[in-house]
Amino acid sequence: MLRPTTLLAFLLWMVPSLLSAGNYSGRVTDEITGDGLAGATVTCLSGENTETDAQGFFSLTCRQPKVLVQMTGFADKVHVLQTGDNIIALVVPGYYEVGPVRVTGNPDEKKVQVSKQRLQKEAVGKTTSSLFPDVARVVQSLPGVTADSDFSGLLYVRGGDPHEVVAVMDDMIIMSPYLWGGRLTVFNPNLVESVDFYAGGYPAEANQALSALLDVKNKTGNTEKYTGLVDLSAATANVVVEGPLGLTEKSSFILGLRRTHYDLIIQAMGAGDVVYPYFYDGQAKCMLPLSNGRLEVQSLFSYEGMDLTLSEAEGFGDDHPEDTRFHYLSRRSNSSVSYDHRLSDRINILTLVGLRFDDSFYTFSDFYTPSDTQVNMAMLQARHVWQILLGDHHIVKSGFYVITGDFKAAVNSTVKIPTPNGYYLDQVESDFTLCWPLFAGLFAQDDMELFPDALFINPGINAQYYSGNRQWVINPRLALKWNVLPAWEWHLATGIYSQHPMEANWLDEKYGNPALVAQEAAHYILGSSLDFGAGFHFQAEAYYKVYRHLLTEDPDPDIRYTNNTEGYAYGGDFILQKKLGGNWDGWLTYSYVHSRRKITSRSDPEDFGRNTSVKPVGSWFTSENERTHALSLILNYEIAAGWQAALTQKIMTGAPFTPVVGAGYVAPIDEYVPQYGRINSARFPAYNSTDLKITFPFFGIPDVSAYLQITNVFDIKNVDQYYYNRAYTKRKELYQLPRMFIGGIRWDF
């Protein structure tokens, strides 16, 4: 942390640059068409501002050359001016935020947006201070969101499960957007343009999302010149290249590649036949402006694997019966082609076709749960959306999507659980092919302005069909926004949200249950937001969620899965945000949640009463996803030219767990069987971690910077799990990440 004298020295060093003014001129243009944008506001960080003329030109005297460029219907742009003519390209946020490029008025101002937070690329880039930079790490600091460990990309939203969150990238649903079993997501921070995160109350156009929606927009490439970056840290290498494509005027491409290399270093040091966890992935996006719209082609590929003998360090006791080896390889790809057709100044049509391929192999040699699994999957999805501006008072959207495909799996697994009566065995040996049922969704919604600049309403309807059980679900949704003052609004939302079972093993006739129905949640949200000026924004919400038909496992091998769980969650959260602009930005969030579940029936209510994996029947218990209190602080500060600091502070209630209260010895199997207390009646100690990232010039080399990340600055021992010796007489702690120093160099060219 900087001493006061050091900070004062930096401020004194900056005074001359703040006092000396410079004259700048430039032009604000549409990135897609190249046309000048009239009426764009250009604001210096030192306070001066002006607007562009009819051709998009401006001139401005600034004491500091960094400016914020804003234009109705476009994303904000932070830019550093240079003396002379300097063209600034504004980035169009994309189809879902702006319909036609040339609009009068901002469509977003007439939309009812509840429980939504937007992260721009600048915020994502500055605040991804973690061992492996990941968009999810930033989202986990937003209100209503928590994580289960330091090394996890899973999102727990307002007491819900991670599978209740649906991820979308450039309008394509990304099924299971995770690497390393949920440790990371496939979203590369260096490629992201913006992230829209809805913690609930999202409009009718969102399908299959039960708790939350993560909508990621990737950047389009530079249309004027070839640029890129090389980012090399102690753990990963990251390369991005972008530039004009040359197929049509203003066409472009962007390509990003990531690869872990710490595993290669360890291997070179003589790790034997051990392969430490690794991944590499690549993303590419091509954009071709056409006369009446634009065509986008994108592809995402990932490859990951490991081959390890797990030890006590991974949570296996010192007298575990044998070595446990885990080996896997996984290759996945998601590709799409989309055409955003500008039919007129008021009508946009989006058509998208996407393909996913998955080829994975897993081997787990644990004594209790040995398994071998081979998975091959191909999935097709299509999406078609209309957006129509009806006069000045309606923004109408409607459309549909379909998902289908084939799934092939060879599974050989055994579940061996010690019980007072001996081992319980559940064995699966299968080689099956499943033709995916058809998932289809239809929606229609209307953002209506009932009273000019004061009262807005968004009624919508979402219908989803699942051919596996021939079930239709109809989800009505409604949201309302009241602008008490131009900077102060109240909003409320309610609706039904459904999610059909999407895992192939849940649907298999022999090893699943094809009669499973859609899970369901009802959302009730009341909130208010206030803009204070000077870039400050505050939003607070209270919510209540009711769950029905949640999926649960059944120990009967002829049933396996049912919809016999219900639940509820209520709470509140807020965010106080200092938006981009000035020497500092960031946000402070607090979340409170109370989440409960209940299993209504099961084939044998008393079965496995001593096994923590089987929940009690007929009584409410704390959800595994509840972190009652969570506080997050993100603070980004520009110390001086080229010097930046990013601070992340997280404090939250420990996760609930079921305590072991004793154990009994079972002679026939020579095992100790644990006896458990009330389910989820204990909690891990509270979590507290501070991360810091400092970025600074690299020996004065132009366009090259270095950074130092310190994870868990105060080296707090946050407990991740407990594990026991064979007799369950001793309990040990498995801790999360210790204090770590991670350095890196970045070259922007």
Image (cartoon, rainbow, N blue to C red):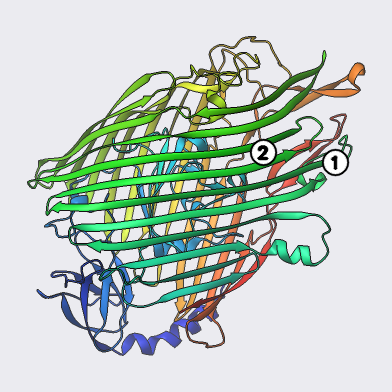
Disc nearer the start of the sequence (2/1): 1
At which x and y percent is residue 428? Answer: 69, 24
At which x and y percent is residue 258? Answer: 56, 63
Q: Could you tell me if residue 145 is visible in this image? A: yes
At which x and y percent is residue 209? Answer: 40, 35
* SS at mark 2 in the image: loop
> Could you tell whether 294 is left or right of 171 in the image?
left
The residue lying at 65 percent from left, 68 percent from top is 234
Q: Could you tell me if residue 173 is visible in this image? A: no
Q: Nearer the viewer, residue 321 or 408?
A: 408
The amino acid type of the residue labelled 2 equals Phe
* SS at mark 1 in the image: loop
Q: Nearer the viewer, residue 143 or 331?
A: 331
Above or below, 670 against 486 in this view is: above
> Could you tell whether 461 is left or right of 368 in the image?
left
Label annotation for residue 383:
none
**Quadrant of image for the N terminus:** bottom right
At which x and y percent is residue 322? Answer: 87, 37
Crowding at dot 2, Cα within 10 Å, few <14 / some 14-19 / many 20+, comes out as: some
The residue lying at 44 percent from left, 86 percent from top is 12
**Quadrant of image for the C terminus:** bottom left
Q: Nearer the viewer, residue 659 or 362?
A: 362
Crowding at dot 1, Cα within 10 Å, few <14 / some 14-19 / many 20+, comes out as: few
Label annotation for residue 323:
1
Write down the residue under mark 2: 684
The mark closer to the camera, 2 or 1, is 1
Classify residue 44 by image quadrant.
bottom left
